[in-house]
Each structure stands twice: as C-alpha cells, then as structure tokens.
Amino acid sequence: MANYYDIDDILAEEELVSVVFQKAVNGVGIDPSAETDCVEPGSKVELPFWLGHELHLRQVAMIKIPPCFNQKTRLELGADAACVDLRSRCQYFYEFGCKLAPLVGDRDMGSFLLSAFKNRYQAVLAKAHSAAYAVASKCLKILTKEETNLYEAAQSSMAAFKKWRIGGPRFQRAAILGRKRKPTD
Amino acid sequence: MYGRKACQLVKDFNSGEKGQLVAFNNDLFDQVIAESSQHYFELQSLIRKMQEKELDVQTSKNEDHFGALIHHLALVRNKRCLMAYLYNRAEILRNLIWKVGPVIPEEIQEKLSHSEEEYLKKHSASLKSYMSRSDLDLAVDMVPPKDPYIQVRVLDDIGEGIVLSDDKTVNFARHSMHFLKRTDAEQFISRGLMEELKG
C-alpha cells in the first residue's frame, strides 16, 4: 500500500472506463441516462477506474478497453513512438495500462506498453540532457506524467552538474517560497 | 458525488507550481466530508431495506447489496483523497521547517488552515527540543564552509535590534551590507531576505 498517499496514483485511478453492468443495482444515481436511481443490467456507463475495477472483480460489471489503448494508438506507437501525443489521449498512459492489463485479459498489453516506453524514453533522455528551452517546451506537451517526471529529474541533475562544475551560490532562497515579485520602490 | 469532488480536491493540491502550497481549500474539504455523510446515509437506508425484505445482509447479493457496495466504495475513495491531501500538505510543511527555520513567512502562513498552523508550531517545538538536547543545530548547511564569515546585502527590511549569536545588536536596513558569521546569515538567506555577495 505504498501508493495510498501518492497523488499520481490517485489521479491515475480516476481515469474513466466504460463498463457494462451485468447485474441490476439499486439506489445509486451513477447512470445519468437512467430516470430512477437504478441501473439495469446491460446498460453502459462511464465510471472512474477505481469504481469499475472493484465492480469488475465482484462481477457486477465488465470493463471494456478504453479508446486510448485501441488499435489506432497501437499502430501509431509502432510506427514512430516518440512523436505520438500521449498526453491528450491519457495523461497516465503507462500506470493506467498496467492496472488495466490483468482485468481485460489482453496478453499483448504488457509488451506493447514496454516497447512504447522504451522508444519514447530514448527520445526523452536525449532531449532532456541537451535541448534548449524552446525545443523542450514543444516536446514536453506530448509526454505523459511519468515521462515528465523523468524529464525533470534529468534536467535537475544537469543543473546540479553545472553548478558543481562552475560553482553557483552556496546558499539560496528556499525554493518552496516561490517566485518573489520585485517590490516596487 | 461518487468521488468527483474528492478528485477535484486532489487536483487542487497539485494546481500550484510544483512543490508550492496553495491555499487550504476549506470549502471543497467540507463538501467532500458532507458527501461522505450522504453516502453513509444512503448505505444505511439500503441495508435497512434489505433487512426489511428479511434477507441475510452478509450473504445475499441483490440489487440493494450492490448499491450499498457502491456507496461504500465511494466513501473509502473520499477518505483516501482527503487523507492524501492532508498528508502531502503536511510533508511540504515539514520540508519547509527544515529549509526555512521555525519562523514561517507571512505569505505562506495565510495559505494554511488552523490545524496546519498548530501542526507547524508543535513540530518546530519538538525539533527545537531535540536539537537542544543533542546540542547540535541540525538545520545548518551540511557542507563545511571555506570561511566562517560572509558578506551579505540586505534585500528586505528585517528590522532593528536583531541580536546575533555573539550578542551584538545589528540594524538591518535595506540595501545595507554586513560582514556576518555564516550561521547567522544562513537563516535570512534561505528566507530570501538577504543575498550573499561574492568577490
């Protein structure tokens, strides 16, 4: 349960999945298209993953693979992984895919995620260590949250290296205090 | 309902810049707690319905049971989001104490809730008693400096009559330059009130 307090884990589980209810449910207002507080078996509802996951395990509903993992995305990632805009499809692509894989019974999911990550990681690493700011901000827009964390880690290690090499101020304003506005005299 | 407000709360925590605190969102916090009470109320009414139909609550799996399950899951989810919100904010505050010292600047004080201020006070007090018992100031820079004294320029009005560690009173007016012991100057530099002059 090391992820209990982890914000990224919580937000990754909030991604929507489409489920089909197998059994009737009473007293919940989840289904926006139903008129009463009941859900009929066979109705399709969009639920967040944490809810869909539990219902799937108890066989109340069946999860379907969300559109961000469909055939089109797989083909695009196979063609050129580094250019695909994963953030617009799903900001937590890898975490979400890892959680989804055992439920949906898709055996290719694991290897597909791994190969996509490997290809993109190469590109991310190269850009993080060398690129100037203008190029960097363009390519940052297509990275998922996990890749962005890696990118920032690489940037901070480069900054630390430069500081060690050239020597920066020994003691600085604590970063947590934020950017100060210049006081108007 | 159903965890959406709780998700908003967690996103709100992340909405500032990375590692920065945003103001404690009291409204959203109370709304999530109110939603949890509502979920609990609905859960209880569904369980009562099952008991009226004389079904065994533990084993029979009819529609009411599943409805109660969904309310229970939403409750647990709300709890997780609330706890994560508080925990991560507390972690930022603890790091703040180590970086900046027991005196927290005004602009951060206004972002905290009442209980967070209490937490901050108690934490700095226990840190202080620990440091005094082990006779070491643990919050100082770990790398030994080349020179025990440094030259600083004051950026903001700190005030007059500040007593330094060697019992001298100094007047820190803005833009004035001083030659201070490094340990004294460090706490002002990390709060952004002074800057180190080199060369």
Image (spheres, coloured by chain):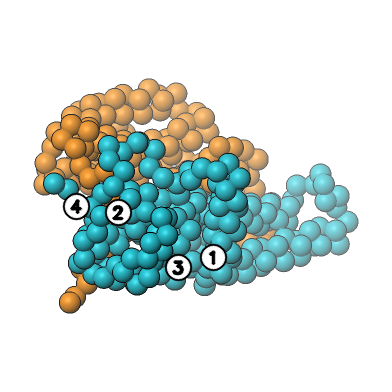
Where is the N terminus of chain A found, in terms of image quarters?
Answer: top right
Residue that appears at 61% across and 55% down? B79
Identify the residue shown where x is 19% and y is 52%. Answer: B197
| 4 and 3 marks on the same chain | yes
The amino acid marked with disc number 3 is: Gln
Disc on the earlier residue, 2 or 1: 1
* Residue that label 4 marks: B197
Left or right of residue A33: residue A85: left
Q: Is residue B37 left or right of residue B47?
A: left
Residue B73 point in image, percent of width and height = 63, 51
* Disc 3 target residue: B109
* Three-letter amino acid code of the residue under disc 1: Glu
Q: Both on one chain, marks 2 and 1?
A: yes
Of residues A69 and B83, the one drawn nearer to the viewer in this rendering: B83
Find residue B117 and name its label: 1
Q: Between B48 and B102, which is closer to the camera in this rendering?
A: B102
Q: Confirm or deny contact between disc 3 and disc 1 (CB under 8 A).
A: yes
Q: State the separation of the CA atoms marked 4 and 2.
A: 11 Å
Q: Earlier in the sequence, mark 4 or mark 2?
A: 2
- The Cα atoms of the two marked residues, 4 and 1, are separated by 34 Å
Residue reaching furthest to the bottom: A185
